[in-house]
Amino acid sequence: MRAYLGCDIGRIREENQDSIRAVDFPDGVLALVCDGMGGMQSGGTASKIAVSEAEAHFCAGYAADMDDAQICELLRASAAAANRSVYEAAVRSRVRGRMGTTLVGAFARDDRCCIVNIGDSRAYLITADGSIRQLTTDHTVVQLLYERGEITAEERQTHPRRNELMRAIGVTCRLLSDTQTVPLGAGDRLLLCSDGLYNMIPEERLAELVCTVPPAQLTEVCIAEANANGGRDNISVILLTP
C-alpha cells in the first residue's frame, strides 16, 4: 500500500487545526488524521499532540507477525496514549475540557485494513467498481438522533447540533474508541479525511474523483474542489492505494 497526503487551511478558518501523518512499514502503511475541535481553545495543539503520540505508540509496539486483532488492539492503545497526552496537556494549561481532537487511523496491508476512530473524521472504502462506503460511524449528536429515528439522513446535514461531538481525544481521562478490520479486494482504495472534506464534496463525487484522478494528484484535486465549494473548514485527506 502507498499513502498520498494533503492538508489545507480552507477558505474561512484563520488557523489549520488538522494534523495528518503516514508511516511506511515493510508490510503496510499507518495513516492518521486528527481534526482539532473547532471553536475550542488549543485545538491545533491537541491535534499535533495526538497524531505524534499515536504514531509513536504504534511504531513502538508494532511487530510484523501481529494478527488483525492485535493490530486493532495496538491502534486502540495508540489512541488511548494520544488521549492521555492531550488530556494531561490540557490540565497543565488549565484548559481541561476545552482541548480536544478527533482521530481516525488505519493500518493497511494489501488485503485488509484495521481502523480506529474517535469523533467525526472518517474512513471510506472505494471499490474497484467505483462504489463508496463509509466505514466509520460518526460520534456526534446528530448521528445518535439519526440512529434513534428522530431525524432523517438529509436532516443530518443541516441540523443545528451537527457539529457536536459525543467522543473526542483529550476531553476526559477515559476514552472509548471503535475498531474494526475490513477485507480489501483487488483495486480497493481507502480514503481518510476530516469533515472539511466530506462536508464540501458529496460521497458519490469523492468516489468519482478517486476512480478518475491519478493517485499522486488526488489530494490536491480534492482540496481544490472542497475550497471551490466553500472551504468552510480545514481540509485533510489521505489516500491509501495498492
Image (cartoon, rainbow, N blue to C red):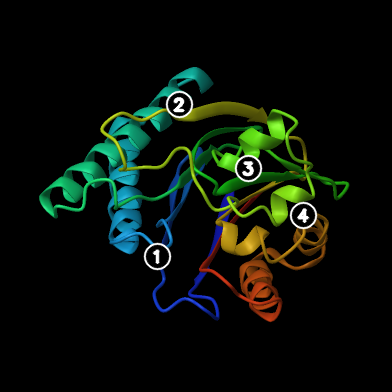
Report crowding for label 1: few under 14, some 14 to 19, many 20 or more residues within 10 A (C-alpha). Answer: many
Whichever of callouts 1 and 3 sits on the residue coming sooner in the sequence is 1
Tell me the residue at 64%/39% (across/down): 143
Give the amino acid type for the residue marked by disc 2 in the picture. Answer: Ile
Above or below residue 127? Residue 39 is below
Give the amino acid type for the residue marked by disc 3 in the picture. Answer: Val
Q: CA distance from mark 1 to mark 2?
A: 28 Å
Between 27 and 170, the residue placed more toward the observer is 170
Residue 203, label in figure: 4
Q: CA distance from mark 2 to mark 4?
A: 28 Å
Q: CA distance from mark 4 to mark 1?
A: 23 Å
Q: Is residue 98 visible?
A: yes
Q: Secondary structure at mark 3?
A: helix
Mark 1 touches mark 2? (CB < 8 Å): no
Residue 142, label in figure: 3
User: Mark 1 — residue?
Assistant: 17
Tell me the residue at 88%/46% (across/down): 129
User: Mark 2 — residue?
Assistant: 71
Q: Secondary structure at mark 4?
A: helix
Whichever of callouts 4 and 3 sits on the residue coming sooner in the sequence is 3
Q: Secondary structure at mark 2?
A: helix
Report crowding for label 4: few under 14, some 14 to 19, many 20 or more residues within 10 A (C-alpha). Answer: some
Between 64 and 36, the residue placed more toward the observer is 36
Residue 52 position in % (x across, y down): 30, 51
